[in-house]
Image (cartoon, rainbow, N blue to C red):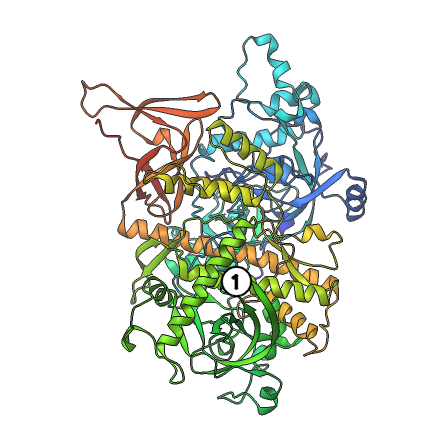
Amino acid sequence: MNNSDSRINPRQLGTPRGIKAERGSYAAVPTSGDRKNLNKPSRGRKKSIFEAYMSKEDVSAGLKRGELIQGPLRINPKKYHEAFIPSPDGTRDIFIDGVVARNRALNGDIVVVKLLPKEQWKVIKPDGSDRETEATHESDVPEDMLGTCIPQEAAKGDAESPDVIIEAQFDDNDAEHGQDHLQDRLTDDIKKLSLDTSEKAKAVGIGGVHRTKQDDGPKLNDPRLLPDKFLQRTAKVVYILEKKHSRAATGFIKLLADKNSELFKRCAMFSPVDHRVPRAYVSLADCPPDFVTRPEDYSNTLFICRIVDWKEDSNFATGQLAKSLGQAGEIEPETEGILTEYGVDFSDFPTEALECLPQSLPWVISPGELAKRRDLRKECIFTIDPSTAKDLDDALSCKQLPDGNFEVGVHIADVSYFVLEETALDKVASERATSVYLVQKVIPMLPKLLCEELCSLNPMRDRLTFSVMWKMTPEGKILDEWFGRTVICSCMKLSYDHAQTMIESPGKIFSPEELPPVSPQHSIAEIQQAVLNLHRIAQHLRKQRFIDGALRLDQLKLSFTLDQESGMPQGCYIYQYRDSNKLVEEFMLLANMAVAHQIYRSFPKQALLRRHPPPQSKLLKDLMEFCNQVGLDIDFSSAGTLHKSLSETFGADKYSEARKEVLTNMFSRPMQMALYFCTGVLEDETLFRHYALNVPFYTHFTSPIRRYADVIVHRLLSASLGASSPIKMEKEAIQKQADHCNDRKMASKRVQELSADLFFSIFVRECGPLESEAMVMGVLNEAFDVLVLKFGVQKRIYCNALPLRGFHFRKVGKKPELTLMWEPEELEQESVPQVITIFTLVEVVLTSDGVPLKYSALLKRPSLE
């Protein structure tokens, strides 16, 4: 893109006449209404739209005094004018209503807010027909309690802490009702923050409370007169503590509407695809040379823009166009857009990092290094991974001992041997913090030479490992434990499918061509026996874990088959989580727990562990009430009782599984994310607990090729065994790295979900319309949410998009119910009623919307039988 001197000075930018807020993106459009509490304009200066941020000192003092509250900002993807921050006491989220109150903060930023007076708090509709008083979490489900998602490429789904892919295709049409609605919204935003108190209650406009007589209205409408349980606290942003949002967005460019304005000659308007990001002025000098003369040529071209500024007196941000990606709706441009928006570094590794790798190839283990390690190269050790995996972190062994017990080993790639502390390579890995698994490829944390070669536990190759070995009974009782640096030579690369066949057909004699190559030192029968022994022990371990109170929420995960030539999705299916996956998971969990105890014992102030806080109490309470309303007997008292309630199937019909999926989805909502932390920073040991696993100490040790936290854990483990000098990081530095790992983990999880969304919407476009059964998982007054059973995606179905004569919402007891009156197909026929409530089974059709990557779910007309 050409750089010329006509860069925009953000200070000169106002709102040009003729720019109207388009459907789907916001601009804070002021009105000439009363603006008492907004900055009074000085001579010649434009009126402010946003409040100036407080000073750092005032914020610090306000937080100390408890007058201000800080937290991560979540903007509702379905209604971008609604934002929330979690309440510090775990009660209902604090509501930030409108763009003006949000004060230029973006999704994910750590903000400081000031509560508004009680008369401006939001009244929660008592009829509960609109459940959206909390922002939709973008699948805030702790991955430690979810099934594994295996992307098409080489993802070894976290065996012990799998990631979930949830369809998060949020429609725009419920958030916007055209331009006028949007203009009113923003006008209201400014009024709300500027009216005097007597007017405020009216402006807040409490919906859902039906006034009976005109004169008793204000009593119901004045939040000051209502008990707190009917109120949601509201606040405004006064400071941004940390800009977590990448400030990058993908979108489209358009000419300004007013051709006669000065700005028209210098700027274009960038409209982001994500409506939570503001529209921005960008310099025409950064746009393609023929954009002004042929703007229509670029109507479907995706651009990346970085938000560089957003002034108090401007409705729009100032952006800088970074690059043109290509056509909207195509896999590579869209993927690059997703990666950039979430700040994933997919550039080539810098030269100084590559110089840290072994330079003389082929690399061999030196005799000196061999002498320091336990030599396990003659043992029967093998890997079990997805068939496409290239980064093999972990291997297993299981040897029967003369006394009838077993020696079981978990052998993990010794990445810390190659990635030394404080080197250029270490710095890059610590910044990336995780590999990111897309449907079609992996963005690795480490250079290919390490993750696919020298560290990957490839078959028939000597590899350096860190091992945990146990002596255990056939029932999985641990008699003895050993940690140490080892060297192994894997004798076979098994896929989950191979291991599954061995488990399902224990007597089967495999011919060599049915399996991958095997090392001449070992027989297929020996490997098969080891797999079966591991499976039997894993079953005992798993059973005991759930008896001890663990919880697992398995959500449906989508996998794709891709065309070899074009890379386009040819088919998609729900990934099956089977016994072979469970086998690997049990031993990874065991190793992670063992290492957590070991490093915490040795370094009580420096250990990097992983905690999982209990569910958010407010959301859990709502869920409990909801379950009571729909007559479900669920015991929420602990992770274990919740798991037990879920496992006891709901009815014996063929849809009991579907009901379980819907419930699993609901139970996931109050769950918090699991977090890395440094033990020296958290005083209270009870906070170390892992809620879902129901254990006091847990960490990540088993995937150092693709998770930086595990690399630190390896260093701590090595130091605890006296095999290396203590780690150089102080507890504060470890905590800082832990926070960064948490942020990148969440970003990579979101990117993974968006990658699956991208491929699924392309699949609908290329192979649709698609029909499927779906189960209702939520009922609102004009729409309902369904889980599409064939594909595990969630969609909202709007009554106004269906050929209905009418529809009616009511509560039966406390259970929400919609009755749809279908237009008859023949004129003289009666209209067909269809009752929609939780767990109703419906037929849906998924069809592409003609807009890139958008698709809708439509309800099929019920048959007359």
Question: Disc 1 designates what residue?
Answer: 476
Residue that lies at the very extreme toward the front in this rendered image: 403
Q: List x then y, in percent, for residue 167.
A: 42, 47
Residue 567's place in the image compared with 88, above or below, is: below
User: What residue type is disc 1 on?
Assistant: Gly
Residue 557 appearing in the image: yes
Q: Residue at x 46, y 33 (%)?
A: 179
Please name whichever residue, 846 or 327, is drawn nearer the observer in this view of the structure: 846
User: Which residue is painted at 55% across and 59% down in the image?
Assistant: 343
Q: Nearer the viewer, residue 361 or 466?
A: 466
Query: Vertical placement of 12 versus 777: above or below?
Result: below
Reply above or below: 752 against 707.
above
Q: Is residue 289 visible?
A: no
Q: On screen, 440 above or below 758?
A: below
Picture quadrant of residue 837:
top left
For the point 59% across and 54% down, the residue is 8
